[in-house]
Image (spheres, grey):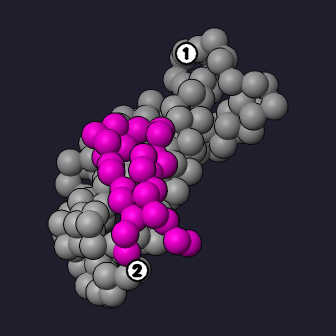
Amino acid sequence: MLACEAIHLARDFGYVCETEFPARQVAEYLSRQHTDPSESYRRKELIHATKQITKELMDLLNQDRSPLCNTRPQHILDPSIQRHLTHFSLISHGFGSPAIVAALTAIQNFLTESLKHLDKMYPSGNNGGAHISVSSSQQQGGMDTKPKDLGDLKK
C-alpha cells in the first residue's frame, strides 16, 4: 500500500468512526454494570478526566506535521516530539496518527454519550448533594472538562 492510499484509508476510517461507531448504544450497555446511584458522581469525574486526557492526545496528534506523500508541511511542534511522530508516520505509511485520532474520536463520542446517559439516569440533584454541570463544549469534546460547580462535594 502506498502512503497516499494509507492516508485515504485513514480518512475513510475517521469518517466511519465519527458517523457509525455505536457510541450511545455502547454507553448504555456498559452503564448497566454500574447501577449504584452513589457511584454516579465519581463515574462522571472519571469520564471527564478521561475526556480531557484523550483530547490532549488528539490535539497533539492533530498538530503532527509529518511529511505525507509529496508534501513537507512546516513543523509547529517542538522538534523533540515531532521527530518521534514523523518516525511513527513513516513506518505506518501515514496511517498511524490519523487512525489513532479516529479511534480516540469514537472514544470521545462514547464518553460524551456516557455522560448524557448518567445525567438522564441520575440527574445532578441525586448525586449526594454535589452538583455538576456539563457545558456544551464539554459534551463536544472541549478541553475544559472539569466540573463547573462541585457544590458540597464530600470526596
Element type where label 2 sits in the image: helix
Q: CA distance from mark 1 to mark 2?
A: 50 Å
Q: Which quadrant would residue 26 be assigned to in this image?
A: bottom left
Q: Residue furthest top?
A: 74
- Tell me the tag on residue 50: none
Q: Position of residue 27 (x, y in %)?
A: 27, 69
Q: Position of residue 30 (x, y in %)?
A: 30, 79
Element type where label 1 sits in the image: loop
Q: Are marks 1 and 2 in contact (CB under 8 Å)?
A: no
Write down the residue under mark 1.
71
Residues in magenta? 128-155
Q: State whether residue 87 appears in this view.
A: yes
Residue drawn at 39 percent across, 65 percent down: 130
Number of the front mark, 1 or 2: 2
User: The C terminus lies in which quarter of the figure?
Assistant: bottom right
Residue drawn at 33 percent across, 87 percent down: 36
Task: Please tell me which residue lies in front, 2 or 105.
Answer: 105
Q: Amino acid at mark 1?
A: Thr
Q: Which label's residue is closer to the chain start, 1 or 2?
A: 2
Q: Indicate yes or no whether the magenta region holds residue 151.
A: yes
Q: Amino acid at mark 2?
A: Glu
- Tell me the tag on residue 39: 2
Q: Is residue 110 above or below residue 76?
A: below
Residue drawn at 28 percent across, 63 percent down: 124
Q: Position of residue 5 (x, y in %)?
A: 41, 36
